[in-house]
Image (spheres, rainbow, N blue to C red):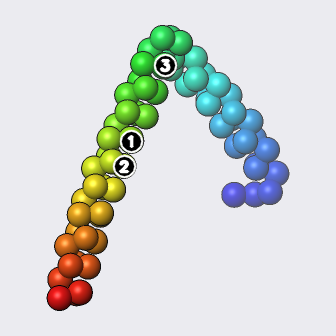
Amino acid sequence: MKLTEVPTYIGTFLKEARQEFRHVNWPTRQEALYLTAIVIGLALGLAFFLGFFDYLFSFIVQKLISR
């Protein structure tokens, strides 16, 4: 690839990217809020789950060590 061909590749890439963005099926505001709430809920649930088991295993290990 020659140095003079680089701007051509960038221009072609930008044109094709713009065309692809027109084909994207963007969610509505309500769908985006709903899916965001699901992601936040799952993240909080997973954090609680992992935190609970971390606390439980730490408690068990601490009891075993302190014997």
Q: Which residue is mark 2?
A: 47
Is any part of residue 40 visible from this angle?
Answer: yes
Seen from the viewer's position, the closer of residues 31 and 26 is: 31
C-alpha span from label 2 to label 1: 6 Å
Q: Which residue is mark 3?
A: 33
Of the residues shown, which amino acid type is indicated by label 1? Ala
Of the residues shown, which amino acid type is indicated by label 3? Leu
Question: Upstream in the sequence, badge 3 or badge 2?
Answer: 3
Instruction: Tell me what residue is drawn at x 62 percent, y 29 percent.
Output: 16
User: Left or right of 58: which side holds 5?
Assistant: right
Question: Upstream in the sequence, badge 3 or badge 1?
Answer: 3
Of the residues shown, which amino acid type is indicated by label 2? Ala
Q: Secondary structure at mark 3?
A: helix
User: Left or right of 59: which side holds 39?
Assistant: right
Q: How many marks?
A: 3
Q: Position of residue 60 (x, y in %)?
A: 19, 73
* Mark 3 or 2: the one toward you: 2
Q: On residue 43, which mark appears?
A: 1
C-alpha span from label 3 to label 2: 21 Å
